[in-house]
């Protein structure tokens, strides 16, 4: 089959997947499998080889990242149940003050908290951000909403163990330690620069409180840690009329007991931090070719995250009890299922694209320069995200399509992964569930969310690719 025919059939397969998802509301998993089947048959792989390629592609990516995604999501679910996020935000506020809160909370969400499933992290942290927004000043809502949007979306694609970053690393055969190091080098300046740019724009009149904020919105009080059977908020008087006014209320007793059982914040996050340190140490050993078998074993991502998961279970069990830990694990398994299957079919599409010979064809279209391919990856991921509305799906699909280019031109796969992640951030808009969650939970009008979320995350997308390009010249 001619090169032009392969390119046309690949384009048709991707376009068909987009149309099925957007126009006919077909589940993305089913749509990507259909696209893979069409592409395999259209380029002449045959029925048997097409099915074999799809299933082997799914299996290979699961071998690489299946346990990693599951362990990461489980750790996040347990940390969420323990109240660690709420306490971390409160600690950041006390330590850095309200003026620096958008930056400190953004960096915390974009780095340390990325083991938590995005929607869960958003639902938990948004009420806290809304309560703290007035403490920042006049532009509190705008700055906090923008910081959260940028941090959430950047973290999921750049930061290990964010689910999209794990998927990208698996699809492109990037060592997870290397993805961790390069991702941190990118995500920290991207978040800081992007929030600073948006703050500058807001102070120059880009935000109109009257039109961009929903003043009819009433945030629900954060009920985390309250006893649902007490019938009142902690600390309110629930004693009967005949009772003494000095008698402790049931709610107050619950709060006192909870506080007495709470472990130090550093202890709750210590297992996760240990996992990341071990993964980073393993990457350094690999880069400098140092032979330390015991550290190499502990630095293997699966072992490191398993250690973190076990440690998180043990620490939080002493704080919230075994039953709560089991409930959190059940929730984590439910959350990880969707992303595991989506990542797997992304691997199926990538395998089919590779079998079709697209890598050799596209490799000839680029010079030895790494700049043009990175911009192409960014643009393809951006276009897919505008059409589909899913950051994770667009990043995975773009990476799968362009992965064959890496060996053809000598491009480091980690740069390809970062470029796909950066492009998938462009234009988070009304087709995204995250857009509507940020709009509603942070008390913004749709017009306001278009500024804080769509423009804010798009700025981060552009900032990221502008930082990746010089990285490609250095590494």
Image (cartoon, rainbow, N blue to C red):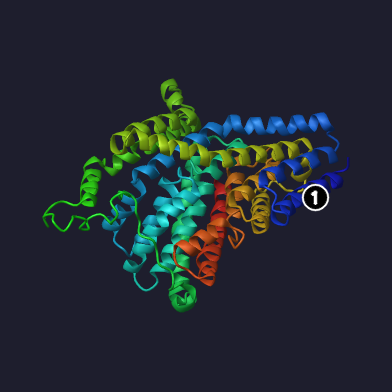
Query: Which x, y percent locates residue 327?
Result: 41, 37
Residue 130, can we see it? yes
Query: Which x, y percent locates residue 168?
Result: 59, 42
Q: Residue furthest front?
A: 242
Label 1: how many residues lie within 10 Å, few (<14), some (14-19) or many (20+)?
some
Looking at the rendering, in which quadrant would you find the C terminus?
top right
Q: Is 124 on the left-hand or right-hand side of 31?
A: left
Looking at the rendering, in which quadrant would you find the N terminus?
top right
Badge 1 marks a residue whose secondary structure is helix
Q: Residue furthest right?
A: 1
* Above or below, comparing residue 340 to residue 372 in the picture: above
Instruction: Please tell me which residue lies in front, 422 or 218.
Output: 218
Q: Is 270 on the left-hand or right-hand side of 367?
A: left
What residue lies at 48% left-to-right and 42% top-to-bottom?
Answer: 160
Q: Which residue is mark 1?
A: 12
Residue 172, can we see it? no
Query: Which x, y percent locates residue 175?
Result: 54, 34
Q: Is 431 on the left-hand or right-hand side of 278?
A: right
What residue lies at 39% left-to-right and 59% top-to-bottom?
Answer: 127
Tally of numbered tags:
1
* Above or below, comparing residue 20 to residue 220 in the picture: above
Query: Which x, y percent locates residue 206?
Result: 49, 75
């Amino acid at each position: 089959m001619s090169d032009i025919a392969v390119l046309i059939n690949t384009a048709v397969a991707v376009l068909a997947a987009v149309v099925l998802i957007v126009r006919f509301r077909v589940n993305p998993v089913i749509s990507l499998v259909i696209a893979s089947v069409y592409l395999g048959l259209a380029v002449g792989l045959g029925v048997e080889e097409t099915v074999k390629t799809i299933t082997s592609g799914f299996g290979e990516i699961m071998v690489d990242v299946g346990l990693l995604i599951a362990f990461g999501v489980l750790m996040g679910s347990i940390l969420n149940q323990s109240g660690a996020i709420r306490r971390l935000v409160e600690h950041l506020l006390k330590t850095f003050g309200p003026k620096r809160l958008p930056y400190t909370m953004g960096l915390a969400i974009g780095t340390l908290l990325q083991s938590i499933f995005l929607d869960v992290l958003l639902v938990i942290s948004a009420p806290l951000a809304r309560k703290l927004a007035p403490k920042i000043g006049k532009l509190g809502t705008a700055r906090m909403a923008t910081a959260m949007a940028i941090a959430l979306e950047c973290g999921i694609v750049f930061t290990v163990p964010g689910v999209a970053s794990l998927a990208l690393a698996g699809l492109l055969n990037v060592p997870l330690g290397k993805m961790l190091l390069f991702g941190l080098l990118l995500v920290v300046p991207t978040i800081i620069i992007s929030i600073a740019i948006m703050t500058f724009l807001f102070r120059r009149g880009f935000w109109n409180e009257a039109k961009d904020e929903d003043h009819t919105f009433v945030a629900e009080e954060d009920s985390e840690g309250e006893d649902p059977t007490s019938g009142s908020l902690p600390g309110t008087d629930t004693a009967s009329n005949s009772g003494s006014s000095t008698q402790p209320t049931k709610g107050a007793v619950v709060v006192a007991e909870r506080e007495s059982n709470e472990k130090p914040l550093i202890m709750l996050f210590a297992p996760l931090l240990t996992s990341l340190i071990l993964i980073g140490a393993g990457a350094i050993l690999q880069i400098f070719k140092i032979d330390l078998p015991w550290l190499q074993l502990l630095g293997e991502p699966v072992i490191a995250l398993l250690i973190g998961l076990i440690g998180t279970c043990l620490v939080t069990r002493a704080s919230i009890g075994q039953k709560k830990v089991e409930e959190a694990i059940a929730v984590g398994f439910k959350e990880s299922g969707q992303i595991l299957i989506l990542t797997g079919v992304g691997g199926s599409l990538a395998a089919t694209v590779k079998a079709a010979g697209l890598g050799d064809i596209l490799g000839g279209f680029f010079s030895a320069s790494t700049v043009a391919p990175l911009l192409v990856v960014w643009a393809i991921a951006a276009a897919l995200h505008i059409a589909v509305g899913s950051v994770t799906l667009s990043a995975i699909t773009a990476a799968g399509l362009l992965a064959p280019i890496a060996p053809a031109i000598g491009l480091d796969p980690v740069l390809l992964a970062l470029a796909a992640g950066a492009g998938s951030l462009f234009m988070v808009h009304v087709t995204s569930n995250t857009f509507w969650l940020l709009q509603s939970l942070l008390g913004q009008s749709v017009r306001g969310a278009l500024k804080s979320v769509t423009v804010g995350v798009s700025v981060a997308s552009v900032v990221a690719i502008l930082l990746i390009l010089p990285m490609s010249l250095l590494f």
